[in-house]
Amino acid sequence: MKGSKTKILIVEDEKIIGLDIKHTLERIGYAVVNIVKSGEAAIDLTGELKPDLVLMDIMLSGGISGIDAAEAIRRKFDIPVIYLTGLTDEETFYKAKITQPFGYLPKPFDQKGLHTAIEMGLYKHKIESLLKQKTIELEEEKKKTDNLLMNILPAGIVKELKLNGSVKPRLFDAITIMFANFHNFIRLIQKYEPVKVVGQLNEIYHKFDMIVEYSGLEKMKTIGNTYMICGGLPVESDDHALKIIEVALKMSEYILKVNEKNKHEWQLRIGINSGQVVAGVVGMHKFTYDVWGDTVNIASRMENYCEPGKINITRNTYELVKDTYDCEFRGKLNAKGMGEIDMFFVNGLK
């Protein structure tokens, strides 16, 4: 900002000195918007006139000093202030420095010194403003990154990842895993408009997300038309199986309501198992929080061997929920490498 484009407010309680400064500034090419004698008037006019810079005498008429007025102007309006003063003692200089002025010009001063001080003050303020803006932008980007991580990973895992740069795999002795899958999804895609079917699937997943979040469980991932959640990790709990069944029933109820208004039927199958898993974060740039172990594989088998509209659980889960939920034995699954696994349908609360 040079020449007439730069508007300057003069704060000087000596009229002759104020006019001399004004004439000097106008010779250089600056626009003087006003001359005031007190700190109070300086604050008011700064808010009204919005000058590009304020030349501030430290000793002023009125109830506050130039230092106090400068601090208020910097805080309220973010406008650069340059001190003009005949006081050069160490105490005054120290007090003035605390307010972080953009220049300090002792009286008497010449035209060249005044011009240099103003241009340096304007330049310093421009750089500071750019740094502030960059800082704000960086903070906003950091918030976006943090929010993205929170959507991908559990809160405790995000904290560990940011603190250590990695997440150690951890063994969980007692958790419950649920797989939900839509039977005959490919047929829906083939029979109806694929874009609309996938769009509705997205709406369903959004509702599932809300149900899971409200229940305090952890969504692990979606793979096509399969939706996977866990209970009891990364924060351990004693009611992980009960909460998973509660969520499974709510999801099933929601799908029934969707089908009442739908021209095609969504056939939801849910498989659940409880047991031990290892959990951890994989990936270097695209992080994924995942679980491994037979417990996971068996939960997936429960979904595969479930009937549409049903909730299929193992005996491990049944033992944890049988006092709360009505379950019926439906037979055994001969799982290769795992032996025979008892299966139960969950009918609802007792």
Image: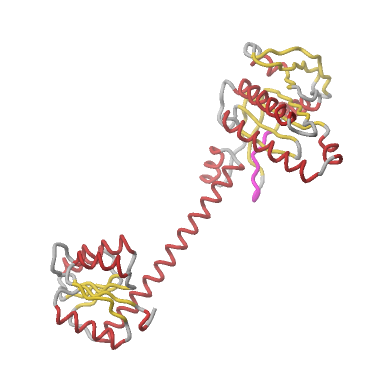
Assess whether residue 290 is covered by the magenta stretch.
yes
50, above or below 245, in the image: below
Q: Residue at x 20, y 69 (%)?
A: 93
| Residue 78 on image: x %, y % | 34, 64
296 with respect to 304 (left or right) = left
| Residue 167 on image: x %, y % | 59, 41
Q: Residue at x 54, y 37 (%)?
A: 156
Outermost bottom residue: 27
Quarter of image, res 267: top right
* Residue 94 in view here: no
Say which of 268 and 47 sits in front.
47
Q: Residue at x 34, y 73 (%)?
A: 52
| Residue 301 on image: x %, y % | 78, 26
Tell me how the rendering is colored.
secondary structure
Give, as a single range, the part of the protein colored magenta. Answer: 284-291
Quarter of image, res 172: top right
Q: Residue at x 80, y 23 (%)?
A: 307
Say which of 243 and 258 sits in front.
258
Question: How many marks on residues?
Answer: 0
295, above or below 76, in the image: above
| Residue 131 on image: x %, y % | 43, 65
136 with respect to 183 (left or right) = left
Question: What quarter of the picture does the N terminus occupy?
Answer: bottom left
60, above or below 3, in the image: above
Question: What quarter of the picture does the C terminus occupy?
Answer: top right
Assess whether residue 270 is covered by the magenta stretch.
no
* Residue 257 in view here: yes
